[in-house]
Amino acid sequence: MENKIIRVAQGKQSTLSQLYINGIFQCYLLEDKIREVKIASQTAIPTGIFEIKLNTWGAKNADYKRAFGNLHQGMIEISGLPNFSFVYIHVGNTIKDTAGCPLCGFGFQFAEGDFQVTQSIAAYKMIYPKLVALAKDPSNKFTIENNFQF
């Protein structure tokens, strides 16, 4: 399986990525800026090979259960990140919504030097069941890499 997050562009404080599941493009992701020294809730996650898992506790999990009902089985957490914890793929449109987590969207815009993603809730509803299936596979792997195109 080719599960990847490929970073393709950087703004002043943002990073735009593409999400691939089984080698097929799914949606765009938005993260904070890549930094050499981590600033809490303002730094993109590192490159490498990681796992995803379902996190079924905490306030964000309860919020998503209310918002998405039976679709929601737990937060999609990127696990094993050095110096990062509770990193979820979730909804949101701008870097103000990230807190260090990737946000999903079907499209993107570039405004005032930074990227934004669009149609985040629709993208989340589409990719969520696929990510849940991967999270339930104990051998799942996600590669995060930089391949800047613009």
Image: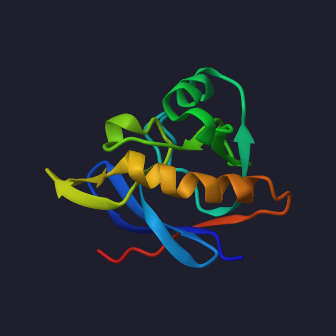
Residue 10 appears in which quarter of the rendering?
Answer: bottom left
* Image quarter in which the N terminus is found: bottom right
Which of the pair 122/59 is nearer the observer? Answer: 122
x, y (%) of residue 4?
59, 69
Q: Is residue 129 left or right of residue 55?
A: left
Total marks in image: 0
> Residue at the location (36% across, 60% down)?
106
Q: Position of residue 96 (x, y in %)?
A: 33, 35
Q: Position of residue 120 (x, y in %)?
A: 38, 48
Residue at 37 percent of width and 60 percent of height: 16
Residue placed at 59% from the left, 29% from the top? 65
Residue furthest to the front in view is 70
Q: Is residue 33 visible?
A: no
Q: Is residue 13 visible?
A: yes
For the residue pair 108 and 42, the one nearer the viewer reads as 108
Which quadrant of the figure has residue 21? bottom right
Q: Is residue 7 above or below residue 2?
A: above
Q: To which quarter of the image does residue 23 belong?
A: bottom right
Quadrant in which the C terminus appears? bottom left
- Is 31 situated above or below 59? below
Q: Is residue 100 above or below residue 64?
A: below
Specify how the rendered protein is coloured. Answer: rainbow
68 lies left or right of 92? right
Q: Position of residue 55 (x, y in %)?
A: 71, 36
Instruction: Determine the residue positioned at 66% across, 22% down.
Output: 58
Toward the left, the furthest residue is: 112
* Left or right, 130 with reference to 150: right
